[in-house]
Image: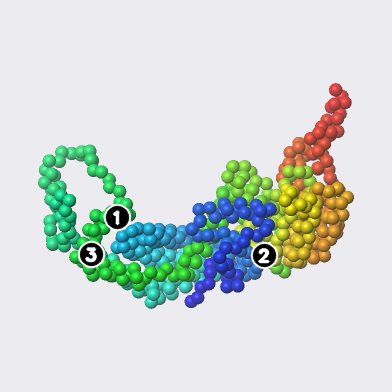
Amino acid sequence: MEFHSILFETPEDGPPSGDVEQPAFFGDLNLDQFVSEATRGFDEYNLTPFFHTELSRESAVIYRHEVMQDLDSQAVLLAVQAFALAMRKMRASLGEARRLYYQRQKQWWFLEATSQYCKGMQAFCEALRAAGPSSRGLNAFSAWLTGYLQSEAFVTLGNDLNEVRTALAGVRYCIRLNGSAVTVLNYDDEEDYGAYVLHIFERFKQGEVKDHRVEQKDWPEMNHVEAQILDCVAELNSPPFMLLAAFHTNHADFLDSTIAAFDREIEFYIAYRGYIQLCREAGLQFSYPVVSRATKAIRCEGTFDLVLAHKLCAEKVGVVCNDLYLEGPERIFVVSGPNNGGKTTFARTFGQLHFLGRLGCPVPGRNAHLFLYDHLFAHFEREENTLDMRGKLQDDLMRMHEILRASTSNSIILMNEIFSSTTLADALFLCRRIISEIMERDALCVCVTFIEELARLGPQTVSMVSEINPNNLSVRTFRVRRRPADGRAYALSVAEQYGLTYERIKERLAS
């Protein structure tokens, strides 16, 4: 039975060849921090290209969902972890074989690597069969692995391995030391001199005594004396060592490419599970989204910025969750409210949700229904670059022009506080033109802005407002709710900051 990949359902989906360039929106959505942290400790697998490669088909996303749900089973997870451990031990042994100097020792470490490989594959096949995964991916791999273990190549590898190990286990020799002279002899049923000495001194033993033995370190490296002794042993017992050398030559490429690919790809799931585990332990919920290319009605309850939540959970700080949905003709969130109230975080959350959904991973929140976009664009405020000889307004316009030129009706556009460097009238004019273009395309959009009029441009726009604590106007709740913008939340916050609320003015007049 053929098996393609545990990450990619079909060859058209992947895997990618070589490195994959980081998407342009990663920095704005803090997804570069997410990938860096999620892949920490997984350097040997080079998982970053997988986190940069988005899926474009609904079935390919569901394929990954099924595998991730299988890994929620303790039996499946333990089987995969044991397999990964066996593969790491195998690579460590191969590393020793490449690193060491003496040829026969290199050959022995190679033999050890193949032994770990064979044992690991047989144990994984049995454990996977016993765990009973339900995903198409793991079931297909289990069937392929069963066939591989029965293949001529693997059976020959196992038989040759057993033959060499049996032959080497039968080697017996003696060493005679006389000053600096070392003589190596074949074993001829000589008496165990160590046992004889212990027997002599046994009669003088009086209860428990202090152990004066010195522990000897078992270093993998040989010194030149040990190497010469081994050469002498090989001369006296040539057949086993000839088998060892032949085994090293005949099975130099013993590692199957499908096994190697599976070993790397399965770690993508393990890395993501490890990243979100901190949030799960803090009580935050994740769900497998329903993704669709046909409908732009989206929804997610109790969602949050994954990167921010990961940091807050590490610091034992609570995370504020929000709900979002678009239905019918609605396509554009216009997010307004006071500064530092969670508006930018909301835009990042929206982008992260859809990227993780297209990555085939569980997303932050419950009851998630997401759109399978073709391109995601982010226009977040950046510091002015004096080297390009452009003003901030010109830079904003040129970046927005490129986004509109490349976007389609299936794109997602995130805009955060654009045109803040110009007057209100000019900003309103420019934003209206841009929002109108997006509405004509029927693309999904989040627009974080101080211009509340944009939320009333048509049935496609939905007003979201970041709220403040009504009992303390200077305190942000970081909740972003779906309601008409009235400007009062921001005005009250500023008035409170400068002591211009009705109550504060009354207090000063009374004094």
Q: Residue furthest top?
A: 511
Q: Nearer the viewer, mark 3 or mark 2?
A: 3
The answer to whether any part of residue 365 appears in the image is no
| Secondary structure found at label 3 | helix
Binning the other alpha carbons within 10 Å of mark 3 as few (below 14), some (14 to 19) or many (20 upward) gives some
The residue tagged 1 is 222
Q: Residue at x 60, y 70 (%)?
A: 13
Per the model, the C-alpha gap separating discs 1 and 2 is: 58 Å
Spatial CA distance of label 3 from label 1 is 15 Å
The spot of residue 370 in percent (x, y) is: 69, 62
Pointer 3 residue: 234
Could you tell me which residue is drawn at 17 percent across and 55 percent down? 182
Q: Amino acid at mark 2?
A: Val
Which label's residue is closer to the chain start, 1 or 2? 1
Residue shown at 52%/58% (left/top)?
A: 270
In this rendering, the answer to whether 157 lies above or below 347 is: below
Residue type at mark 1?
Met
**Where's residue 205, x and y in %?**
15, 41
Please determine whether, in this image, residue 477 is positioned above or below residue 1.
above
